[in-house]
Image (tube, rainbow, N blue to C red):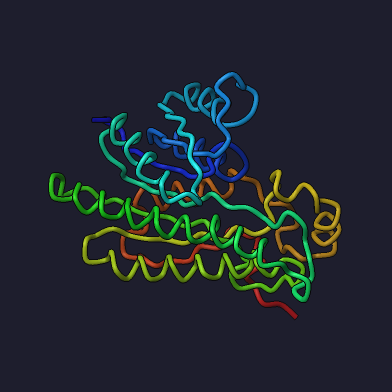
C-alpha cells in the first residue's frame, strides 16, 4: 500500500496528460500513467520519459499500456494500479484524440465519429464506472479518505467547431457524463469535476498552430497567450488536493478567459 495518494491518469504519455502527471507528482502523488503507446527503451518521449521526470521530482510512476477505448483493458489497468499501489485516490480521465482529418460537418464520416466517441467518451465513461466501484469499496476500509474523479473535456463541449463536429459532440457527451457521475457519487463523498482546457500547446494542436497564433494575436484569448499542459496540471492538482470540497460537479475552464462573453 502506497503511503502517498495515488492518481491514475489516462493518456499520460504526452501533452496535457504529461503536464498533469508532473504537477500531481510535485504535490506528492504517486502516479499511474496509462497510454496506448508503450516503449520502455524510449526515455526521450512517452510514458518512460514521464517516468524519469516524475522520479526526478521525487515520486513514483507506474507506466501502464492500455487502450482506453478497449473495455477489456480497463480491468488490466485497474489491476496494475492495485498491485503496485494498493488503491486509487484520484482518477483523471484525460485520454482523447482529435479527428485524423478535419472535415465540415456535412462531410463528417461515421468512422471518424465512432472513433472519437469511443475514445473520448465511451472509454472514460466505463473506466470511471469501474474505478468508482473500487473507490466505494476502498471507503469501507478507509472512511476518512476523499477520492475524486476528474474529466478533462474541452471548451469544445460548449463551443461549436463545424470542421470537427465529432470532437465537439464527444466532449459535450463527456461533460454530461461528468455531471451525472458527480450526482451519483455525491452520497459516497466522491467528488467529480470537469476541467475544460482552451487552446493548449500540445502535439494535438501542432497542425493548426499558425491558425491559432493568428487568432490569439487578434484577441481571441483575453490573456493573449497559448495555454500549456502545466496550466491544466495546476488546475487538476488544486482539485485533487481537495481544495474544493463543497463543489462537486464544478466545471473549471482553463482557457485564458475565453469563457468571458465580450462585445
Q: Count every numbered label the image shows and give the total.
A: 0
Location of the N terminus (image quadrant) = top left
Q: Position of residue 12 (x, y in %)?
A: 53, 39
Given residues 102 and 159, the one toward you in this image is 102
Q: Is residue 56 above or below residue 140?
A: above
Q: Residue at x 31, y 42 (%)?
A: 88
Seen from this angle, which residue lies furthest bottom?
263
Location of the C terminus (image quadrant) = bottom right
Q: Position of residue 3 (x, y in %)?
A: 26, 30
Seen from this angle, which residue lies furthest top?
41
Q: Residue at x 52, y 56 (%)?
A: 152
Q: Residue at x 67, y 61 (%)?
A: 112
Q: Position of residue 11 (x, y in %)?
A: 54, 43
Left or right: 188 in relation to 141:
right
Given residues 74 and 235, the one toward you in this image is 74
Q: Position of residue 78 (x, y in %)?
A: 34, 41
Left or right: 32 in relation to 259:
left
Left or right: 194 in relation to 46:
left
Amino acid at each position: 500500500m502506497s503511503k502517498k495518494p495515488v492518481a491514475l491518469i489516462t493518456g499520460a504519455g504526452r501533452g496535457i496528460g504529461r503536464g498533469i502527471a508532473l504537477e500531481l507528482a510535485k504535490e506528492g502523488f504517486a502516479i499511474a500513467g496509462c497510454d496506448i503507446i508503450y516503449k520502455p527503451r524510449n526515455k526521450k518521449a512517452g510514458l518512460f520519459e514521464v517516468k524519469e521526470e516524475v522520479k526526478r521530482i521525487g515520486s513514483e510512476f507506474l507506466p501502464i499500456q492500455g487502450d482506453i477505448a478497449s473495455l477489456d483493458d480497463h480491468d488490466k489497468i485497474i489491476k496494475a494500479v492495485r498491485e503496485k499501489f494498493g488503491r486509487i485516490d484520484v482518477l483523471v480521465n484525460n485520454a482523447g484524440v482529435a479527428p485524423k482529418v478535419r472535415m465540415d460537418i456535412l462531410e463528417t464520416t461515421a468512422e471518424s465519429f465512432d472513433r472519437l466517441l469511443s475514445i473520448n467518451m465511451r472509454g472514460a465513461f466505463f473506466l470511471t464506472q469501474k474505478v468508482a466501484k473500487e473507490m466505494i469499496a476502498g471507503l469501507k476500509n478507509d472512511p476518512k479518505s476523499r477520492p475524486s474523479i476528474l474529466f478533462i473535456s474541452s471548451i469544445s463541449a460548449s463551443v461549436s467547431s463545424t470542421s470537427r463536429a465529432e470532437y465537439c459532440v464527444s466532449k459535450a457527451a463527456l461533460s454530461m457524463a461528468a455531471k451525472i457521475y458527480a450526482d451519483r457519487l455525491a452520497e459516497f463523498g466522491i467528488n467529480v469535476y470537469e476541467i475544460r482546457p482552451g487552446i493548449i500547446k500540445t502535439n494535438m494542436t501542432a497542425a493548426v498552430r499558425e491558425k491559432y497564433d493568428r487568432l490569439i494575436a487578434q484577441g481571441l484569448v483575453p490573456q493573449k497567450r497559448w495555454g500549456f499542459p502545466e496550466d491544466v496540471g495546476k488546475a487538476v492538482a488544486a482539485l485533487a488536493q481537495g481544495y474544493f470540497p463543497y463543489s462537486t460537479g464544478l466545471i473549471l475552464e482553463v482557457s485564458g478567459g475565453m469563457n468571458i462573453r465580450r462585445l
